[in-house]
Image (tube, grey):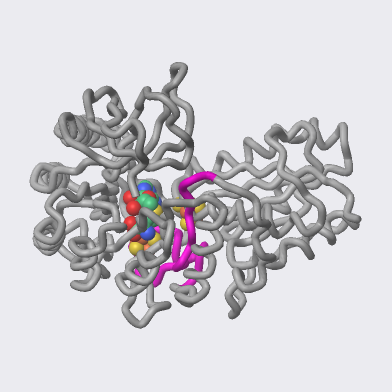
């Protein structure tokens, strides 16, 4: 019999880290670790970290500082750092933070049980290698517990694009795709445990080549799985959006009408300096082709303002592109210089300028997002219900376009997909009414 040990994982950064945290918890499950929701009673604390912007990376050190007193009370407590900060600054973390027992980079999670054992035996352990084999092959099988209706599933990892601002190619390594058979098997397993929607993850998910038909081939294969109602994928690079994938958006009903397609800037000069390898016109044409295949698709994007060399005129070009596209969802950031990336060495835009541009861009994006959301009123959509809402009898779920929809109605269960008419648009959510109170869709 294994001894019960408590594991607390805190996850920062992108959805891939959420998925990785689940897999790490499972891998440590074999050593008797059970997840707990507070660091206070944990035998092991793992911080799964993000290095994308300076603020994200700095959080790790302040969070670690907070564990000092816990460790003083309980010297047996083991503290680990995983994720992209571990990969980028592993050695430095061990130097700066004596209370850290283990450091593990994103490509070494299959070695976590070994590292944990080493740490329990009193040694400090570091593994930030990029091994050849697929780490997921070596992780223990998932325990067969029931789970929520929506799940992430990593199918592609790493990036070969080297945008001039970005640390991901260094922290996640080269592009690797998982074989389609494994993805299909893992999806079946998730569906058996109650999952009805999967989001396929990859840093460049549409560069997926683990299926002869690419990501489109994988999506079509997954759509044949009984009980899987919805498929989403993220994040896509505009240059990897091929005809087959665009066609799938018009033809595969399980593929949801939502696409995260970051462009970063609307200025050709800035796009070139970013090494994005496409211009604004090519992006706009791509958007047109996607909308021709699936007219109601909701587009989402990422923007960086204040990239080195961005002039007032360049920034206006970004606003013009936003106007032309009309996004339903967007994330925008001030450029943050990252050590080891080419753009960090270039002359920087003053902070006050970045602040002002970010505010102007966010105001425009907010207005746009709200307009797109408001247009949903009166329409019908399937909603996949995930959890209780704010009032008794209310449940909240996601629409096909990934809006949060609150619905009050008799007997709506978690994991149910129901037909809803959108009645009202509020800040960041919609309110809907059940159309078929007695019957679930599909
Ligand atoms: N692979 C994805 C996203 C990677 S990171 C893609 O190609 O789009 C998510 C977002 O963080 C990026 O799209 C970008 O908008 C932002 N980002 C990345 N590096 C950044 C930096 N140094 N400063 C500010 N934002 C950054
Ligand atoms: Fe980073 Fe660019 Fe790769 Fe996206 S495509 S992960 S932004 S380098
Ligand atoms: Fe952050 Fe790494 Fe994801 S840097 S955004 S956790 S790939």
Magenta stretch encompasses residue 169: yes
Q: Residue at 31% of width from left, 61% of height from top? A: 236
Residue sitting nearer the eye, 35 or 11: 35
Does 139 appear above or below 323? below
Task: Give the percent coordinates (x, y) of residue 397.
Answer: 39, 36
Does 6 appear above or below 276? above
**Residue that sits furthest to the top in the current view:** 391
Does 131 appear above or below 333? below
Task: Give the percent coordinates (x, y) of residue 436.
Answer: 29, 34
Q: Residue at 42% of width from left, 60% of height from top? A: 200
Q: Residue at 48% of width from left, 27% of height from top? A: 388
**Residue that sits furthest to the front in the current view:** 438
Left or right of residue 318, residue 411 in this image: right
Q: Residue at 44% of width from left, 68% of height from top? A: 156
Q: Is residue 295 visible?
A: yes
Boundaries of the magenta span: 148-174
Q: Is residue 268 visible?
A: no
Q: Quadrant of the N terminus?
A: bottom right
């Amino acid at each position: 019999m294994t001894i019960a040990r408590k594991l607390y994982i805190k996850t920062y950064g992108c959805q891939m880290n959420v998925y990785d945290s689940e897999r790490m918890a499972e891998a440590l499950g074999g050593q008797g670790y059970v997840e707990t929701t507070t660091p206070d009673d944990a035998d092991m604390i793992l911080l799964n970290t993000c290095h994308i912007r300076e603020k994200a990376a700095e959080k790790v050190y302040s969070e670690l500082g907070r564990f000092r007193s816990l460790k003083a009370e309980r010297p047996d407590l083991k503290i680990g750092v995983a994720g992209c900060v571990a990969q980028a600054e592993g050695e430095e973390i061990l130097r700066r933070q004596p209370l850290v027992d283990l450091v593990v980079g994103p490509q070494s999670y299959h070695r976590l049980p070994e590292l944990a054992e080493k740490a329990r035996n009193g040694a400090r352990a570091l593994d930030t290698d990029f091994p050849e084999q697929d780490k997921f092959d070596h992780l223990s099988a998932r325990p067969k517990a029931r789970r929520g209706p929506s799940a992430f599933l990593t199918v592609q990892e790493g990036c070969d694009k080297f945008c001039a601002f970005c640390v991901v190619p260094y922290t996640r390594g080269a592009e690797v795709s998982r074989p389609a058979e494994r993805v299909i098997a893992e999806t079946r397993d998730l569906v058996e445990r109650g999952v009805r929607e999967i989001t396929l993850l990859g840093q460049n998910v549409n560069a997926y080549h683990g299926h002869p038909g690419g990501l489109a081939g994988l999506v079509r294969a997954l759509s044949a799985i009984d009980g899987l109602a919805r498929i989403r994928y993220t994040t896509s690079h505009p240059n990897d959006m091929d005809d087959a994938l665009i066609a799938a958006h018009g033809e595969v009903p399980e593929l949801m009408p939502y696409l995260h397609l970051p462009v970063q800037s609307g200025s050709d000069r800035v796009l070139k300096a970013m090494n994005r390898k496409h211009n604004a016109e090519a992006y706009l044409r791509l958007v047109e082709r996607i909308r021709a295949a699936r007219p109601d698709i909701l587009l989402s994007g990422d923007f960086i303002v204040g990239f080195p060399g961005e002039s007032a005129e360049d920034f206006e070009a970004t606003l013009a592109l936003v106007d032309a596209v009309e996004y339903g969802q967007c994330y925008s950031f001030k450029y943050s210089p990252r050590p080891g990336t080419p753009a960090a060495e270039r002359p920087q835009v003053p902070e006050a300028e970045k602040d002002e541009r970010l505010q102007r861009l966010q105001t425009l994006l907010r207005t746009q997002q709200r307009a797109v959301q408001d247009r949903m009123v009166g329409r019908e959509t399937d909603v996949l219900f995930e959890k209780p809402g704010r009032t008794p009898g209310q449940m909240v779920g996601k629409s096909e376009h990934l809006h949060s929809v609150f619905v009050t109605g008799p007997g709506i269960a978690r994991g149910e997909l129901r037909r809803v008419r959108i009645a009202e648009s509020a800040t960041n959510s919609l309110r809907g009414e059940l159309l078929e109170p007695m019957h679930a869709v599909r």
